[in-house]
Image: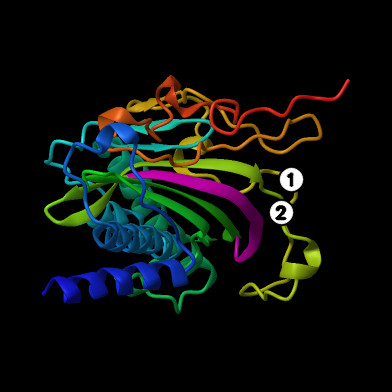
Amino acid sequence: MMFKKSLSALAITGAVLAGGIALQVSVPANAESRPTISQGEAAYAALQVQNTMSRHAYYHAAGMNLEEVDTLWVDPKGPNAASATFASPMWVMAGLETVRNAYGKENQANREKALKAIQAVDPSIEFTAANLGAGHEWAMHTNTTPIIEVAGDGKTAKGVWYSPGVGLMAKVTDDDAEVNSVFFWEKYAADFIKENGKWKIWHLQMAYDFTPGFPKEMIEAIEIINGSLTPAGDDGPMRQAGERMAELPPGFQKPAYSYPPYSPTRPGLIYPRLPEPYYTFSETFSYCNCDSTNRPDNSATLGIVKLKE
């Protein structure tokens, strides 16, 4: 039996590594005397965490933010709901209720408004649940280069991903529509917690490096309903609900650190901070971007190279 268990652990570990996940299974020295999950258990947990994050990408691309929150995030009636966060360089949605309202319900209302607007352009589009998404934004984020760290006690996990992607949004005017576009070059960081045997999103954070619009040649082939396409100018790419607001609404707060987009004056830095081995969540930092533990540069983790005079 032990031999079979060892083979299973090796098989799981091999499968995870073959899938491109950079899995950390080491634990801090002070965890040696405490019960620690096996490498096989850590490998399986990392695979489940990766699946949860990938499901987020699929839900979000379909515009199903509310369904995502209700399926992938922590239990709204559980002990982790009040401390759940969704953060960007400009805002932090504090508490699962805020996340569900601003990221979920508001998006759902906008999908319904967009469908009604596109109906005015093409009356053949029926106002049904099956057509939700017509006229609304399509935001596709790909999660690449994962680094996942599972806690030694097996109760929480951390991960970072680079997330290149694209976004398109129909802008209905009168009897026609045009498309706004944006490239996403950004990163995700997340804390996950195991609830009732399932890995759930607890803290989710975005950090944008570069979000330019598409060149005209990339979108001019898209035929929009009745007329020719007029690509959007620099009137701003698509943004999450809170970024479209002049003032932060109730339940939102300012981030502890506002990651700057690329410019020639921005120094090289690693942010969000990469996961590090830890035993239990109280002994590590949080990706909530609501405190000072995020280390806004790489000085405390990788060191700063001494410059030559």
Q: Is residue 92 toward the left or the right of residue 181 in the image?
A: left
- Circle number at residue 133: none
- Identified at 45% across, 62% down, the residue is 21
Q: Which mark is residue 234?
A: 1
Residue 201 drawn above or below residue 93: below
> Disc 1 marks which amino acid?
Asp
x and y percent of residue 194 in the render? 20, 49
The vertical placement of 248 against 14, above or below, is above
Secondary structure under badge 2? loop
Crowding at dot 1, Cα within 10 Å, few <14 / some 14-19 / many 20+, comes out as few
Earlier sequence position, callout 1 versus callout 2: 2
Residue 40 image position (x, y, % from top left): 27, 63
User: Spatial distance from mark 1 to mark 2, Cα to Cα?
Assistant: 8 Å
Per the rendered image, the range of residues in magenta is 174-191
From the viewer's side, name the closer residue of 78 and 240. Answer: 78
Q: Is residue 260 magenta?
A: no
Q: Is residue 186 magenta?
A: yes
Callouts 1 and 2 close, C-beta under 8 Å: yes
